[in-house]
Amino acid sequence: METMFRPEMLLIILGGAVATYLTRIGGYLLIKRFKTIPPRVEAGLNAVPAAVLTTLVAPAALTGGPETAVALIVSLLAGLRFSGLTLIAIGWAVAMGIRHFVL
Amino acid sequence: MFIDDFKAGLRRIAPIIVSASPFGVLFGAVAIQHGMSTGEAVLMSAVIYAGASQLVGVNLFDQHLPAWVVILSILAVNFRHILYSAAIARHIELLSPWQKAANFFLLTDPHYAEIERQAHSGEPITFGWVMGLGIGLYLPWLALTYAGCVLGAFIGDPKSIGLDVLLPIYFLGLVMGFRKRANWLPVVIASSLASMAAVKFVGSPWHVSIGAVAGIIVAALMPLPPGTHSEIEEG
């Protein structure tokens, strides 16, 4: 294994690791300060996974080119029936098909 | 007991290893193409262990920005973990403080999703189970990063084999998996619009935090289902 470690890269990696661990434990430390979870906070927490993961998807339709946008729309519909690797394969095939035969 | 729970956790995470593997390889390959050494890439996977932020970090490192800007961007992409760790606090009461600390180190999108699923089905969430879940994905992630580094030297343009579209489609599949939850459609619409506006007018990676907060605020402001108050007060 090539084991070159540059000081600047080590700073970014270890700083990023500390920042990431703080995000992983921070929400727990914050919520433990409340004794009960108010219903609206709970409704907000229940929305977290869909809300966050959506932000990793929707902008790609704008920035990833037309083939990514079409692949995402097809995957959205296919996602009503398929999940996991099947869904990834469908979206990938659509994007690659457009890239090779249309663009 | 521990070992049985550990195996149950491993079995639960096994299919996710398959779908996460392209991204471990992708990260290793992209890291090498952006001038990282194999040692640096594997170390990054070992101590950060959050694929999307690792890819963002590698991209930014290439642009010769100050270290704190890159670290802040990694923080922004991983900000969602604050919300995950708050959400699972009520599900991990069986764990001791040190066990919780270890579990939080291994907290990822699928790790969070599986804990929610386990809690929803009413099964106990033990230390053995979360370790099977977490270590079951952590060790393959390191191996896949290394494999990606080896491959990275051979892949010319990741777009030519469609590597770039895998990540958003993978996340889309996770979003669709939550579609039975209350407020799912308004949340997804709000987060989509806010994140697309933010990526255009504020810039990456802040669209993640801005879009997420928009969806969460919409969910918090939606009419509460009847009976929610009494349930909370009794508990």
Image (tube, rainbow, N blue to C red):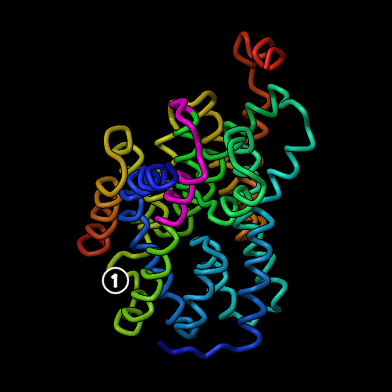
Q: Quadrant of the N terminus of chain A?
A: bottom left
In the current view of this chain or complex, which residue is farthest to the front?
B1
Give amino acid for label 1. Answer: Ser
User: In the image, is B154 to the left or to the right of B203?
Assistant: left
- In the rendered image, residue A43, in percent from the top left (x then y), is placed at 63, 26
Figure check: B137 above or below B180: below
Which of B223/B88 is in front?
B88
Which residue occupies 68% across, 43% down? A28
**Among the 4 quarters of the image, the one containing residue B180:** top left
Which residue occupies 79% across, 37% down? A33
- Residue bearing mark 1: B160
Which residue occupies 43% across, 49% down? B133
Which residue range is magenta in the image? B120-136
Tell me, yes or no, whether the highlighted magenta stretch contains residue B18.
no
Q: Chain of mark 1?
A: B
Q: Quadrant of the C terminus of chain A?
A: bottom left
Which of B228/B184 is in front?
B228
Which of B60/A68 is in front?
B60
Magenta segment main secondary structure: helix
Which residue occupies 47% across, 49% down? A57
- In the rendered image, residue B70, in percent from the top left (x then y), is placed at 65, 71
- SS at badge 1: helix
Figure check: B150 above or below B164: below
- In the rendered image, residue B81, in percent from the top left (x then y), is placed at 61, 49
Asked whether the viewer can see residue A71, the reply is no
Tell me, yes or no, whether the highlighted magenta stretch contains residue B124.
yes
Residues packed near mark 1 inside 10 Å, few (<14), some (14 to 19) or many (20 plus): few
User: In the image, is B197 to the left or to the right of A62?
Assistant: right
- In the rendered image, residue B37, in percent from the top left (x then y), is placed at 48, 85
